Amino acid sequence: MYSIADRQELTKRDMVSLTIEAPQIARKIVPGQFVVVRVNETGERVPLTVAYKDVAAGTITIIFQVVGKSTAMLASLGVGDAIKDLCGPLGAPGTFDKVGTVVGIGGGSGIAVLHHLLLGHRDAGNRVLGIIGAREKDLLILVDEMLGVCDKLMITTDDGSWGMHGKVTDAFKALVERQVHVDLVIAVGPLVMMRSVTEMTRIYRIPTEVSLNPIMVDGTGMCGGCRCTVGGKTKFACVDGPHFDAFEVDFDELIKRNQMYGRDERTSLLTSITAQ
Ligand code: NAD
Ligand code: FES
């Protein structure tokens, strides 16, 4: 069993941060890797990326949005409660080379994943610029943490309630048009956002990495649930990724696959709420 050491509500819209006592995982995990959580004996396996770790305290912090029954169960846990199973670290570790200027672009809950990755790029000696966006001010997460890791941070909201009025891609375009030299872009967020970023960076010829979050079941390369096409070949995001060269990813196929279970997820959430 893994005890919850801290719980925070990050936004008014079901974004929760749980800090879990897991000293062995905290010691081993590197930015970009994830864990699979099972709340209880009958719970399904939920893959969640780790936003940060505290090796001294022996904890990891996961940040997630309540989208279905399992994430709702996880969000209902409080300090002192325990999670049945926690498996990790899983996924290929990210690579963090000194390349110069790295721009991290994060949308919505993807900002949690981006934050951990940018820590790795900063520690590798890079200049780190951040662009984070959400639909509105109340949905933005980890602003203080991103300010802590970025040399410069740009904020966007779709409704203009904080920072630049527009999407993260608008801020990125403004950055590039100011002739800022960029050596690497890391984009994490909704697939449509990562596809839009990639369409731009392809034109600007800036190497780009994305962190994919397809449907995952076992998280260990056995079920095929997380398959995606990268460079014309089938890859399993849980073992070959989740980080890939953005220019190689077939985003259209992945968007279609990820939409397949959206209705089921909403139904399971509604059923669990009705049953309470
Ligand atoms: P959202 O739809 O509110 O979008 C967040 C921001 O992304 C927007 O404010 C905008 O700036 C940008 N964006 C969205 N669509 C865009 C487009 N077409 N072009 C340019 N920019 C665009 O995001 P949300 O509701 O918080 O959803 C989060 C999504 O992120 C979910 O789909 C979730 O599956 C995904 N996610 C991905 C990862 C990952 O590892 N890739 C991790 C966590 C969450
Ligand atoms: Fe099963 Fe990746 S989640 S193969």
Image (cartoon, grey):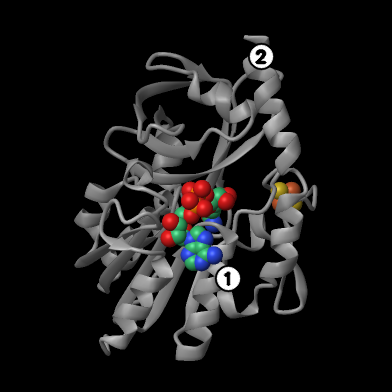
In the figure, residue 244 lies in which quadrant? bottom right
Residue 12 shows in the view: yes
> Could you say whether the residue bearing mark 1 is in a helix, strand or loop?
helix
Q: Nearer the viewer, residue 151 or 66?
A: 66
Residue mark closest to the camera, 2 vs 1: 2
Q: Is mark 1 within 8 Å of ligand 1?
A: yes
In x, y percent, where is residue 263? 74, 39
Q: Is residue 11 above or below residue 177?
A: above
| Image spot of residue 233 (x, y percent) | 77, 74
Q: Residue at x 48, y 82 (%)?
A: 201
Residue 247's mark?
Answer: none
Vertical side of 190 occupied by 126: above or below? below
In-image side of 73 versus 44 (left or right)? left
Q: CA distance from mark 2 to mark 1?
A: 36 Å
Residue carrying label 1: 195
- Compare marks 2 and 1 and give the one earlier in the sequence: 1
Dividing the picture into quadrants, the one containing residue 234 is bottom right
Front residue of 105/125: it is 105
Please give the name of the residue rendered at 27% of the width and 37% of the height, measured from the top-left corner. Answer: 56
| Residue at position x 57%, y 30% in the image | 71
Quarter of the C terminus within the rendering: top right
Name the kind of residue labelled 2 in the image. Thr
